[in-house]
Image: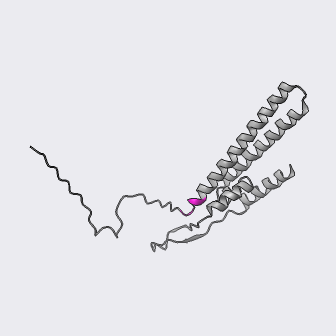
């Protein structure tokens, strides 16, 4: 149980202790505006981190709320499984023991699903880490495409 407290302390320390981002000039030449530097993350590394320690893959992707949520969900499900296992070992009634074991197994299945979902989330976030989310959503053509023309010719022949 002590490892659980240590992991929680590490996640909280890093979540609130290392909030820094680097900034760089935009490529367009507008020296007044700045944007976040988009650094490519390793999807496989994020997924393996999420498998090794609950929430580490999300923390690697700078998704601090998701990291805390993943850590809390996985820790809660581990604690629930341990609780139901201890209850199952403490009783001698067969029906009650089966009930407790069923609850333990359900918690273990939910834990497995949560771990897989956390790994998938870390992988997808890392894959999209260098995706540019520019606020310009206009449909105007860029200056490179202005001099080019695209056309469609439609011919309909009616046979009489």
Q: Residue at x 62, y 60 (%)?
A: 43
Q: Quadrant of residue 73?
A: top right
* Quarter residue 48 falls in: bottom right
Q: Quadrant of the C terminus?
A: top left
Q: Is residue 40 left or right of residue 104?
A: left
The residue depicted at 13 percent of the width and 46 percent of the height is 158
Q: Which residues are magenta?
A: 126-130
Q: Percent position (x, y) of residue 159? A: 11, 45
Against 134, residue 103 (above or below) is: above
The secondary structure making up most of the magenta span is: loop
Give the image quarter of residue 122: bottom right
Residue 125, x across and y down, in percent: 59, 56
Determine whether, in the image, residue 64 is placed left or right of residue 133.
right
Q: Position of residue 53 (x, y in %)?
A: 75, 55
Which residue sits furthest front?
A: 159
- Residue 145 to residue 98: above or below: below
Residue 132 inside the magenta-drawn segment: no
- Tell me: 147 left or right of 4: left
Vertical comparison of 45 with 159: above or below: below
Q: Position of residue 24 (x, y in %)?
A: 55, 72
Q: How is the image coloured?
A: one colour
- Write the residue at 90% across / 29% down: 91
Q: How many marks?
A: 0
Residue that appears at 55% across and 64% down: 130
For this rendering, which residue is in front, 93 or 133?
Answer: 93
Q: Farthest residue to the left: give it.
A: 160
């Amino acid at each position: 149980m002590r490892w659980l407290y240590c992991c929680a302390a590490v996640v909280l320390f890093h979540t609130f202790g290392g909030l820094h981002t680097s900034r760089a000039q935009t490529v367009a030449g507008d020296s007044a505006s700045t944007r976040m530097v988009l650094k490519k993350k390793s999807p496989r590394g994020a997924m393996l981190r999420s498998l090794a320690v609950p929430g580490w893959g999300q923390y690697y992707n700078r998704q601090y709320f998701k990291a805390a949520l993943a850590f809390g969900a996985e820790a809660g499900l581990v604690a629930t499984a341990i609780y139901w296992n201890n209850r199952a070992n403490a009783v001698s009634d067969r029906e009650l023991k089966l009930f407790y074991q069923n609850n333990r197994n359900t918690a273990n299945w939910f834990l497995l699903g949560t771990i897989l979902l956390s790994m998938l989330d870390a992988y997808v976030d890392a894959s999209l880490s260098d995706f540019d989310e520019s606020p310009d959503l206009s449909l105007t053509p860029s200056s490179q495409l202005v001099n080019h023309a695209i056309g469609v010719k439609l011919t309909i022949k009616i046979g009489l």
